[in-house]
Image (tube, helix red, strand yellow):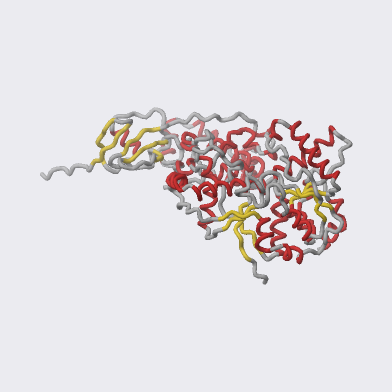
Amino acid sequence: MPDKPEAETVEIFIMGKKYEVPKGLTIMKAMEYSGYQYIRGVGCRGGFCGACATIYRLEGDYKLHTDLACQTTVQDGMYLTQLPFTPAGRKQYDLEELEVSNNPLLDLYPELARCVSCNTCTKTCPQDLEVMDFINEAIRGNIKEVAEMSFDCIQCGLCAARCPAEIPHHHVGQLARRIYGRYQAPESEHLDERVEEIKNGVFDDELEELVNLPEEELRERYENREIEA
Amino acid sequence: MIYMKDILYYPGCSLKDTAKGFEDSAIKVSEEFEINLKELSRWNCCGTVYSLTDDNLMKQLGPVRNLIRARDEGFDRLYTLCSMCDNTLKRTNKLVKEDEEKLDKINNFMDQENDYEADVEIRHYLELLRDELEWSTVSDKVVNPLEGLNVAPYYGCMLTRPKEIGLDDPHEPSVFDELVESLGGTPVDFPYEAECCGSYNTVDNEEMVLRKTQTITAGAGKSGADVIITACPLCHFNLDRRQADLLEVAPNHDPVPVLYFTQLMAVAFGHPEVSKFEEHAIDPRELFEPEMKVGSER
């Protein structure tokens, strides 16, 4: 019987401790392979939720790299740790009571004015957003531009962790998108129509039926549901 | 079609917000010279105030990046309108042109941008008028000569100081005077032409700025000025907006409207409508009524 081929491995360092893991694993799976169990710092495993922010260096490279653990495969000589949460003050506000004409972004996050345009945020962003550019737009009060340029932000917070001016970029972008959605974006008619349908109880029977299904049947329906591949 | 020459232009934040009339009038006036003010397609804040901290290069990154972007777009000159942007960009440029070690360090830090080779020149729009187009070209475009209009040239601090980067003599500046003459107006001799407006004290020491505003605007009025011109959005804020505040506590004050120099040019060139005068706290429109009518008929 031929020998089972050995999986090619790479050497990585998780918080300074050496592990040998199969090549091709994502950082997240490599950590699990090495015996770590995620309780926080993991979510969708698909690159959307922003929970698994990771920072790493590669041997012989001065750069501090940032990425999502679920999206990046391990490399030989990777020194890594996860940064599942970045403390960054998120302001309390009532969207209905914001003075939209008076640059609420700068009003709620005056630290925006500390930006020296060093561009570290942009270099850090695992989504490749032009973070510094939208911070500049935020200072100028251009809500729409901030909303559009930050649209793909997944709130991982790495920018805020690296910013020398201590700006919580992801919260600023989120506020801009909320203001844009509430006050500036064109209304979508189909959404209004659907909301009206819901209000008028068009879907009540369907929902009621689901709520009353026995667990077995609900499970079967879930497993046989139509879903995009 | 008229051939328009592109010049690369750095607006800065104020010209996109509180000083929109400055930008709009400059764009319109430039068209008369067959010049297209081509906005730098990506830019960040100039830095606002030049950092005097010798060993903290972090504050120089923003201005240097704007210079790199100008070079990336294939230009070796970048024109400014706002005198604070002009001042900050010129001083940073001077710093890195004269100190190779600092430039190296900045280039090493900005390792995702092209290196800056200290090969871009910052020019203020007034230098374009005076040194490249010359005053006779400006005079040629005048359709409404500002006859009988007394204009107080207000230079403030940033256009002329420090003298290493200033575009005119810091003690006896004359570029505004020459501009006013070429528009057919009369520059008035005015003792506060280079007096500080109070600058950012407007944020937390309003009373001091009110006093400065009173000194400067009343001084201009006493010298016979009908209007004051400036190139600085912050001076404009302090002399215009704070003058309106001043009127509340000093109702006897005789207000003098404050214009960006390009707005005055737009009036003389027959396009007063581009200046957004309605946004000024001290409305200058009464002064230009006949010209405004000409403008609106066009």
The residue drawn where x is 73% and y is 48% is B230
Q: Residue B185: where, in percent of width, then height?
A: 82, 57
Q: Is residue B54 shown to the viewer in this render?
A: yes
**A223 and A177: which one is in front?**
A177
Residue closest to the eye, A44 or A192 = A44
Q: Quadrant of the N terminus of chain A?
A: top left
Spot occupied by residue A162 in the image (x, y as percentages of width and height): 46, 36
In the image, farthest residue toward the right: B252
Quadrant of residue B84 within the rendered picture: top right
Which residue occupies 41% across, 35% down? A52
| Residue toward you, B231 or A202 | B231
Q: Is residue B70 left or right of residue A3?
A: right
Residue at image location 60% in from the left, 48% down from the top? B164
Name the outermost residue toward the bottom.
B1
Q: How many marks?
A: 0
Q: Quadrant of residue B194?
A: top right
Residue B141 at x, y percent in the picture: 76, 65
Q: Specify whether A183 is left or right of A42.
A: right
Name the residue at 72% across, 60% down.
B29
From this view, report whether residue A184 is shown above or below residue A108. below
| Residue B85 in view | no
> How far across and down, in percent of the image, does residue B287 sit?
86, 52
Q: Is residue B22 above or below residue B195?
A: below
| Left or right placement of residue B244 versus residue A97 in this view | right
Which residue is outermost to the left? A1
Above or below: residue B296 compared with residue B60: below
